[in-house]
């Protein structure tokens, strides 16, 4: 066994910290491009900015963590995306945060990192949970005790999980003509954003695919972004096993933009997970809009869409942009007659996973997202589109505009809703 | 023309001279140290940065090994602020014979150099970027030591005991009165003035320049041959501990983490003139290859600086080789009374920075003996100013400081994380930190350092305007 084949999280952490990200700091030419794009340093002086916290500060880090303000980084990944030198700035920050939190992880960060647990606990009592989370005095207690801001967006629990729906629904009537796909719904897609998963599955079935939904757990992204690398590593490898059980060599589709990013590159680049199972899954997984655009590029996407007359704001989430695949949703939406999708042009909505939930980060997250909320309201007060769950919750909560995954319009345009 | 007087004049403000002037002052002599430039601009500012554990010499030079082990412990105590306790390893790469490790282990035990064998997997967990073909590893107490901090620490201690430190005072002549030394003549290069320092005794610590100084006193043909070695600093620490090859001492066998950089070295080439050391292309390539052997990918990392220093190799047939009583291995004391018939002049050269305090002790002992004084050495018993807390240096210190003042100060030098306040204070001599090292991984930082340290511009004028600052940060 070479050290890198090991599943031992410690080895893996070292691999990431030392081989991938840390080596890249040498390439920084101090051009400041990352500084000008960081959505957090644009709104608060509390954060020293990506160049400082990344390639500069890293030279001063050895074991001990002394620069606690690095936790103001939201891990949005914008800096890494824009760096012309290939410095893995956001990855360095995430790794340094993991070292920092190794000793004193707040209970709050542990809790909000357990998306599945929250979903499982809330589903059976969804109406109660929703009402409770909408109840101001309770939220104030939660803020005080747990550190989740009283006004932070919370997912709406559903009465039915995706698995529940899959069990109860009528079997698809059309026999598959295009072979099979594996569907990865992610925690949110399984518990909170059930509608997005349903529509995605229905669209894929409409296209002629058999959609296999294996039993699946969390990708560990929230734990990763909160610096809990060991748990996150165990999570993602478990998930890889589950997705692989869905079928060998099948394409895996997901409408969970951020979880897809975790599988595609973050687990490897940030946590240094270097495991053949992850390598297998990460090369097979596609974002649903990316998949539809691929089909279109190959001339295989039916475009007999219904006309939908709508002008709709579209926001590409940071974690989607970080996947380096452009903005496939914009291209697909253009195929639907009548749809005029307007790209937000805003870097980040502020939430960055669980960042904007925390009481000490809430104001910053709101300031980051403000231009987006304004743009959304001005463009269409009734509907906005965005690919990831937490960003949708943030936009909806802060702008008051209903926010859906782009698949929503595709589903409608195929006459499925 | 200024005239001063002292019991003892120490020539050369490297580690040796600073150690000697501290020792002399602590023994109660009125002492003056002179250097032609600033302190630590000779070999002491151009060396490798390793605080030897002794491990390197356990087989080749057991006596030096024991001395290093003892002095390492003393310096970590009395000059804590100059020392980082990085720890170190001796590792057998694929080109080294792992069986040599047995000789090493035996040698370490015999010389009382603390060393323990550890498993390769433990080593790779601690230093994951090391060559995965390493077959054996020993842990030792190597550290890194900042030459400037060390020299200024010793000099400040000497000042505290009444010594005078005269920088930019170039010795041009040594006057004798019959068979005795009478005065040292210097040129103050800042004012152009000549300075005469009347004295009873002179200790020549000019190292690679020691032959030139001896000649000024009429002691000719003291042959000190400069042995030049090059080193290369890499932009960040590729390892956080000192990595030595587990082999008989050779070229390019040590990687030392020094502050935020790490330094690979070194070589040994005879030079003609210590002021004209050449860094050859071949040697640079040789060092990069050596680095690659320890850390795969070394050649792809960013090299930021190369420099050379000169070991003073004393080749003098008239050195009393039978008189080892006052000698450390690798160090030579030349008694010009017995060699040239001139009383009151000792030349000392060689040794290591790690053993500088011990060298000083030996030469000052010899001086006391010649003067007929009984004054014991106390330099090992007391911390120098700034090291009283006993807290050793940590690489995180400046990041920590900037974390504290990030909201009310501005960072001027980004590579070295220097705030505006630090620079403004640094340019005032009384506030100047003993050491502000710049690895110069950006040009502006290098310019800044030169501007302030050569004081070629009035503080706060030229360099302030010409320095770019971090964008988006509050001024
Ligand atoms: C390449 C290399 C790597 C090394 N690495 C290590 C290491 O890792 N660890 C270690 O312990 N040791 C190391 N050493 C050894 C160590 O650097 C030296 O032993 C030590 O620095 C010598 O100090 P010094 O004071 O004797 O000499 P120097 O520092 O050279 O001091 C001599 C001083 O004399 C001054 N001078 C010259 N002419 C005049 C004049 N006319 N008037 C007034 N002043 C004058 C010079 O300006 C200079 O400051 C290394 C040496 C070399 C060459
Ligand atoms: S964008 Fe990249 S190269 Fe430019 S300052 Fe940031 S990290 Fe350095
Ligand atoms: S990840 Fe986002 S918040 Fe963090 S430094 Fe980079 S751009 Fe700024």
Image (spheres, rainbow, N blue to C red):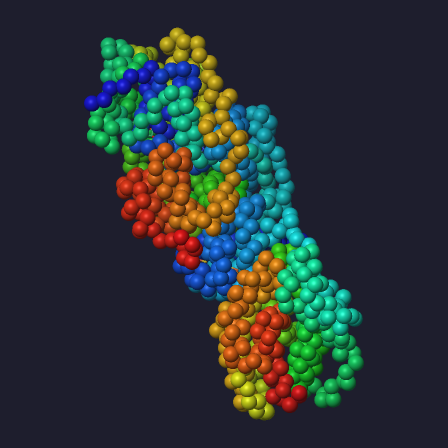
Against B325, residue B263 (above or below) is: below
Image coordinates of residue A114 in percent, x first then y, are 70, 62
The residue at 61%/88% (across/down) is A413
Which residue ends up furthest to the front in the rendered image? A137
Residue B211 visible in rendering: yes
Left or right, residue B56 beside residue B271: right
The residue at 28%/11% (across/down) is B180
Residue A182 visible in rendering: no
Against B155, residue B406 (above or below) is: below
Left or right, residue B109 beside residue A114: left
Quick one: B15 or B317, which is closer to the camera? B15
**Based on the displayed image, in which of its 4 quarters is residue A307 positioned?**
bottom right
The residue at 50%/37% (across/down) is B393
For the image shown, how many numbered marks are present on the structure?
A: 0
**Based on the displayed image, in which of its 4 quarters is residue B361 positioned?**
top left
Image coordinates of residue A262 in percent, x first then y, are 61, 65
Left or right, residue A241 beside residue A42: right
Quick one: A313 or B231, which is closer to the camera? A313
Image coordinates of residue A304 in percent, x first then y, are 58, 92
Against A209, residue B33 (above or below) is: above
**Based on the displayed image, in which of its 4 quarters is residue A132 positioned?**
bottom right
Against A246, residue B308 (above or below) is: above
Left or right, residue A366 beside residue B202: right
The residue at 63%/75% (across/down) is A255
Quick one: A38 or A407, which is closer to the camera? A38
Q: Quadrant of the N terminus of chain B?
A: top left
């Amino acid at each position: 066994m070479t050290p890198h084949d090991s599943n031992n999280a410690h080895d893996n952490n070292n691999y990431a910290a030392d081989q991938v990200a840390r080596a890249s700091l040498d390439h920084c030419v101090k051009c400041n491009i990352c500084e000008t794009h960081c959505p957090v340093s644009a709104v608060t002086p509390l954060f020293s900015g990506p160049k400082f916290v990344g390639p500069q500060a890293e030279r001063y880090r050895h074991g001990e963590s002394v620069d606690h303000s690095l936790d103001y980084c939201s891990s949005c990944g914008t800096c890494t995306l824009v760096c012309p030198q290939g410095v893995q700035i956001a990855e360095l920050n995430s790794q340094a945060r993991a070292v920092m939190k190794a000793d004193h992880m707040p209970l709050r960060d542990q809790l909000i990192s357990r998306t599945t647990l929250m979903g499982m606990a809330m589903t059976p009592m969804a109406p109660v949970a929703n009402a409770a989370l909408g109840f101001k005095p309770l939220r104030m207690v939660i803020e005080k005790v747990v550190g989740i801001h009283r006004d932070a967006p919370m997912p709406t629990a559903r009465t039915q999980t995706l698995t529940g729906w899959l069990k109860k629904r009528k079997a698809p009537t059309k026999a598959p003509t295009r072979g099979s796909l594996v569907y990865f719904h992610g925690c949110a897609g399984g518990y909170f954003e059930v509608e997005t998963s349903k529509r995605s599955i229905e669209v894929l079935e409409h296209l002629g695919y058999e959609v296999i939904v294996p039993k699946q757990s969390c990708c560990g992204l929230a734990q990763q972004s909160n610096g809990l690398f060991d748990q996150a590593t165990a999570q993602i490898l478990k998930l890889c096993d589950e997705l692989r059980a869905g079928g060998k060599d099948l394409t895996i589709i997901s409408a969970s933009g951020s979880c897809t990013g975790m599988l595609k590159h973050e687990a490897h680049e940030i946590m240094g997970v270097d495991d053949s199972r992850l390598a297998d899954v990460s090369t097979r997984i596609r974002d649903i809009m990316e998949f539809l655009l691929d089909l279109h590029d190959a001339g295989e996407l039916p475009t007999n869409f219904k006309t939908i007359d709508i002008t709709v704001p579209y926001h590409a989430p940071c974690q989607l942009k970080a996947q380096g695949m452009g903005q496939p949703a914009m291209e697909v939406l253009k195929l639907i007659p009548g749809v005029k999708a307007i790209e937000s042009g805003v870097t980040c909505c502020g939430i960055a996973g669980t960042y904007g939930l925390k009481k000490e980060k809430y104001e910053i997250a709101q300031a980051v997202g403000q231009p987006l909320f304004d743009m959304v309201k001005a463009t269409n007060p009734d509907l906005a589109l965005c690919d990831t769950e937490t960003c949708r919750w943030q936009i909806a909560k802060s702008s008051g505009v209903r926010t859906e995954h782009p698949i929503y319009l595709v589903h409608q345009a195929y006459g499925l809703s | 023309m200024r005239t001063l007087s002292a019991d003892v004049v120490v020539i050369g403000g490297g580690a040796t001279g600073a150690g000697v002037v501290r020792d002399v002052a602590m023994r109660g002599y009125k002492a003056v140290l002179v250097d032609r430039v600033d302190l630590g601009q000779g070999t002491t500012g151009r060396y490798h940065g390793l605080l030897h554990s002794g491990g390197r010499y356990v087989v080749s030079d057991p006596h030096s090994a024991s001395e290093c082990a003892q002095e390492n412990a003393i310096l970590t105590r009395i000059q804590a602020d100059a020392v980082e306790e990085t720890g170190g390893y001796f590792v057998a790469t694929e080109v080294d014979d792992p069986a040599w490790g047995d000789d090493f282990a035996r040698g370490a035990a015999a010389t009382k150099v603390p060393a323990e064998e550890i498993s390769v997997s433990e080593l790779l967990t601690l230093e994951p970027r090391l060559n995965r073909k390493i077959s054996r590893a020993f842990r030792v107490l190597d550290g890194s030591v900042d030459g400037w901090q060390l020299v200024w620490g010793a000099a400040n201690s000497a000042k505290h005991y009444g010594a005078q430190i005269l920088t930019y005072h170039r010795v041009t002549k040594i006057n004798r009165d019959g068979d005795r030394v009478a005065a040292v003549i210097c040129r103050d290069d800042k004012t152009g003035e000549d300075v005469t320092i009347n004295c009873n005794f002179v200790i020549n610590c000019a190292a690679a320049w020691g032959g030139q100084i001896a000649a000024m006193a009429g002691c000719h043909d003291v042959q000190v041959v400069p042995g030049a070695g090059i080193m290369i600093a890499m932009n960040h620490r590729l390892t956080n501990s000192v990595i030595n090859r587990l082999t008989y001492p050779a070229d390019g066998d040590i990687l030392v983490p020094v502050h935020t950089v790490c330094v690979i070295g070194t070589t040994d080439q005879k030079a003609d003139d210590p002021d004209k050391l050449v860094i050859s292309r071949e040697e640079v390539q040789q060092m990069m290859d050596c680095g690659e052997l320890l850390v795969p990918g070394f050649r792809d990392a960013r090299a930021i600086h190369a420099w050379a220093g000169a070991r003073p190799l004393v080749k003098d047939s008239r050195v009393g080789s039978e008189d080892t009583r006052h000698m450390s291995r690798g160090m030579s004391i030349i008694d010009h009374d017995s060699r040239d018939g001139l009383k009151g002049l000792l030349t000392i050269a060689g040794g290591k920075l790690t053993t500088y305090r011990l060298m000083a002790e030996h030469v000052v002992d010899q001086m006391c003996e010649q003067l007929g004084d009984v004054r014991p050495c106390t330099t090992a018993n007391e911390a120098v100013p700034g090291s009283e807390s006993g807290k050793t240096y940590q690489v995180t210190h400046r990041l920590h400081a900037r974390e504290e003042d990030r909201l009310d100060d501005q960072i001027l030098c980004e590579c070295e994380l220097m705030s505006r306040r630090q620079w403004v204070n640094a340019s005032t001599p009384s506030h100047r930190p003993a050491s502000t090292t710049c690895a110069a991984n950006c040009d502006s930082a290098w310019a800044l350092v030169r501007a302030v340290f050569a004081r070629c511009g009035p503080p706060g004028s030229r360099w302030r305007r010409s320095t770019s600052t971090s964008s988006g940060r509050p001024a």
